[in-house]
Amino acid sequence: MHFLKKDIGVKKKKKLFSSHTLIFAGRMTWKLADVGDWSYHGVNHSIKGNGGPDCVNYLSTERRIVETIIACTLGVCSLYYGLRTYTVPPVPKVVREDRGGKRLLLVLMCLVFGIEIGFKFSSRTVIYILNPCHVITTIQIFLLAAPPTSKWVTILFRIQMHCLYGAMLAILFPVLNTRKRTLELEIYWIQHFLILVTPFYLIRTGVGGVYTVEALNDMSWAFLTKGLIFLYHFIILQGLGMVTQVNLNNIICPAVSDPFSGPNYRIFAMFHQAALTLIIGKVYTKLSLLVLQALGTIVWTGEKYVAMAALRVQQLCSMCKAQMSRKPSKIEQADNDSHLD
């Protein structure tokens, strides 16, 4: 009888455990279905280049695997070289408070990006927030909001400098066939222009601070960024794109505006994306420094660029130290004694 009661108890526990497992599995399935409903079920597959079975089958499985192996190998090698050779300057002491222009730019970026997120939620296409331009916008909002007291600000600033080519390509080869709502087109242009303007403003305010760029002959940050971009596209975006049938940043099939459209479009993309990552950041930096130098905001000392405001403060402090260290003359001493009397 004792063993019989024990067996009955074990069976009851097994039934209870299995019922709890089924309930948990049902809740998880419901939650995943709910996430899919607002994240990507609103994607219109009938629009060319937007996704769907035709987009997923654009390339064969073997072709995708081979290209993914090649891209990830290049990405890992670039990332390894960048991590081995990059350097981060020490965080300087913060002398100046944030300007009103920086806060205004932060509010504008948050407003534009908030409207863009609202469009994504209303159309049930939130998955597009993972596209690189939206990720760069998020990084730039952090750079504008974060206190300039951490080396991570410099790290993220230098990485996003080599991702600016994405906004340039979005302006030169826009994909607008999915933007049908009011203000969607305007927000598209404003967001991508803000991506290009924000680094210039941060360089203007951050010469000698945390918003600094590496030397023009230092390619470590460019290679590090290239490795991150390759791995992000071919592992994260391609993986999610194949599961959801959403063409995230055109990694599943070519965009309607892609000049290299065809079965080899991803091979061409590996070359021109790598070249743009290594070149555009340097060109943007050099042009920004030349413009700021022409405006008189910064000056070239022969070794590095220095902000004029910081240079004036340094000169003023040097004058103060010189005056304090200079011994007063006999006439000045007599005047001081008369004042004391």
Image: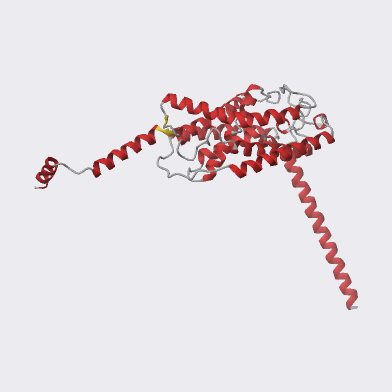
Residue 229 makes an appearance in the image: yes
Residue 37 makes an appearance in the image: no
Pinpoint residue 15: horizontal percent, then vertical percent.
85, 62
- State the residue in front, 90 or 215: 215
Pinpoint residue 40: horizontal percent, then vertical percent.
73, 36
- State the residue in front, 321 or 101: 321
181, above or below 27, in the image: above
Q: Residue at x 47, y 25 (%)?
A: 291
Q: Residue at x 56, y 41 (%)?
A: 155
Pinpoint residue 150: horizontal percent, then vertical percent.
50, 46
Q: Quadrant of residue 166?
A: top right
Q: Residue furthest bottom?
A: 1
Drawn side of residue 245 relative to residue 79, left or right: right
210, above or below 168, in the image: below
Drawn side of residue 23 relative to residue 115, left or right: right
The quadrant of the image that shows the N terminus is bottom right
336, above or below 304, in the image: below
- State the residue in front, 264 or 220: 220
Pinpoint residue 241: horizontal percent, then vertical percent.
75, 36
